[in-house]
Structures are given as structure tokens and as C-alpha cells.
Image: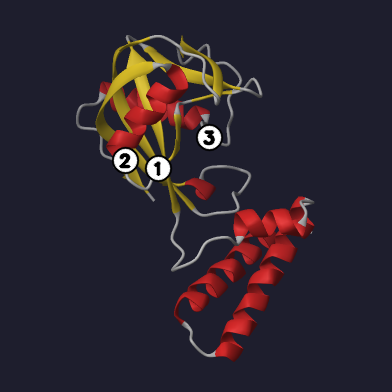
């Protein structure tokens, strides 16, 4: 069984059913699309070994027309070193996370960096707008638009928080083990290139 193909089929069924439920009014159609949505959750449960109820809560809890989720990752530099935060599993990534509903991409990148690293930064320009699932080996249950933001370090020091356990500054040839579901070596390489090129063209999928 090609696990990734099954995940993509489940995601497509979930997308079709949620969009249909946002607009259809016929009670028989509503019942049919609700069942299709349940099938998508059962398929996802089968390939992930997660309980159907847990999958439904995470995968099928939205309403309205389905659009990709939006996340930011901040590329923060001090000299020739990039800022990374260490998560509780011991892996490292650029600070970032889901964009809060009431924040812009710029403000979210600044907020996430402060929360996860204790660093005050200024968001300066965009590096890339990525279709997350095209750039990671393991697909996510949701479609995600990942925005990579070049930021300037201002001040700060690490502060304990509920998401990360440490932060550090790293050179590109001495990177720690990465949480590649969030930050890949390609992201870091891209960030260094954007830092050195004031006319960097934003990469987008």
C-alpha cells in the first residue's frame, strides 16, 4: 500500500465533502457528504493507526470552504549564524507556527520568535511561500502554506516556555539535528542566500 497516496485520497475526499457541506441545502445531499467525510476519516485512521475519533477531531473539525492553513517560519540572523529553537523532542527548527487569526504574517513571525526563543526581531522581507507538502517527505493531514520570513535580530535572551527548551545560533556547516517536518537544510540554505542578496526574488509554489 502506498501510504502517501491513501493520505492524499483521504484529504481530497475531506476537502470535497467539507466544501459541499458549506453550500448544499438538500438534506439528502448533506447526509451523503457527511458520510463521505466520515469515510475520509476512516481512511486516514487506517493509514496512521490513530483512533477514528481522534482523526475526526483533528482532520474533520472545520467548517466553511476549506483553504490551506497558514504558518510562518522566521529566519533570524546574528552575524553569520542563524537562530534555531530546540523542541521538547530534542530536534531543532526555525521559530514559527500557525498564523493566529488576528495577526498578519509579519506580526506572527515576530510573535512566534519572541514566544519560542525570547528574541525580539523585526521582520524585514519574504524569502519563500511554500506548499508545505511539496517540500517534505512525509505529507501533513492538511494543506499548508508555509511563509519563510527574513528577520533582523534586535535583542533578547532565551526564556522558558511551553513549546521549546532552548535556542542557539548555528553556522550552516554545524547544524544540530533538525525537525525536518518544520525546517529542512534547504530552508536554511535558502535563508542564507536571501540574507546575502538584497534583491532576492521571493520563491513561491
Give neighbour class at mark 1: few <14, some 14-19, many 20+ (Cα, 10 Å).
Answer: many
First of labels 1, 3 by sequence position = 1
| Residue 28 horizontal/vertical position (percent) | 60, 90
Give neighbour class at mark 3: few <14, some 14-19, many 20+ (Cα, 10 Å).
Answer: some
- The reply to whether callout 3 and callout 2 are in contact (CB within 8 Å) is no
Residue 19 visible in the picture: yes
What's the residue at 71%, 71% (across, down)?
39
What is the quadrant of the N terminus in the image?
bottom right
Residue placed under numbered mark 2 in the picture: 105
Residue placed under numbered mark 1 in the picture: 99
Q: Residue furthest left?
A: 199
First of labels 2, 1 by sequence position = 1
- The reply to whether callout 2 and callout 1 are in contact (CB within 8 Å) is yes
Give neighbour class at mark 2: few <14, some 14-19, many 20+ (Cα, 10 Å).
Answer: many
Taking the image as shown, residue 100 lies to the left or right of residue 51, namely: left
SS state under label 1: loop
Front-most of residues 182 and 4: 182
- 166 over 197 or under it: above or below: above
Amino acid at each position: 500500500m502506498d501510504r502517501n497516496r491513501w493520505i492524499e485520497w483521504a484529504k481530497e475526499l475531506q476537502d470535497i465533502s467539507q466544501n459541499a457541506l458549506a453550500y448544499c441545502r438538500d438534506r439528502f445531499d448533506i447526509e451523503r457528504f457527511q458520510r463521505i467525510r466520515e469515510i475520509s476519516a476512516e481512511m486516514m485512521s487506517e493509514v496512521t493507526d490513530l483512533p477514528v475519533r481522534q482523526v475526526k477531531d483533528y482532520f474533520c473539525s472545520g467548517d466553511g470552504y476549506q483553504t490551506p492553513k497558514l504558518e510562518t517560519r522566521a529566519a533570524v540572523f546574528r552575524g553569520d549564524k542563524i537562530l534555531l529553537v530546540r523542541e521538547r523532542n530534542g530536534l531543532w527548527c526555525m521559530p514559527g507556527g500557525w498564523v493566529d487569526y488576528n495577526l498578519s504574517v509579519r506580526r506572527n513571525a515576530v510573535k512566534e520568535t519572541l514566544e519560542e526563543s525570547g528574541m525580539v526581531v523585526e521582520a524585514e522581507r519574504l524569502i519563500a511561500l511554500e506548499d508545505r507538502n511539496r517540500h517534505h517527505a512525509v505529507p501533513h493531514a492538511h494543506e499548508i502554506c508555509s511563509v519563510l520570513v527574513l528577520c533582523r535580530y534586535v535583542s533578547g535572551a532565551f526564556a522558558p516556555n511551553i513549546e521549546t527548551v532552548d535556542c542557539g545560533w548555528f553556522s550552516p556547516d554545524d547544524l544540530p539535528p533538525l525537525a525536518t517536518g518544520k525546517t529542512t537544510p534547504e530552508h536554511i540554505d535558502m535563508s542564507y542566500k536571501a540574507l546575502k542578496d538584497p534583491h532576492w526574488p521571493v520563491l513561491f509554489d
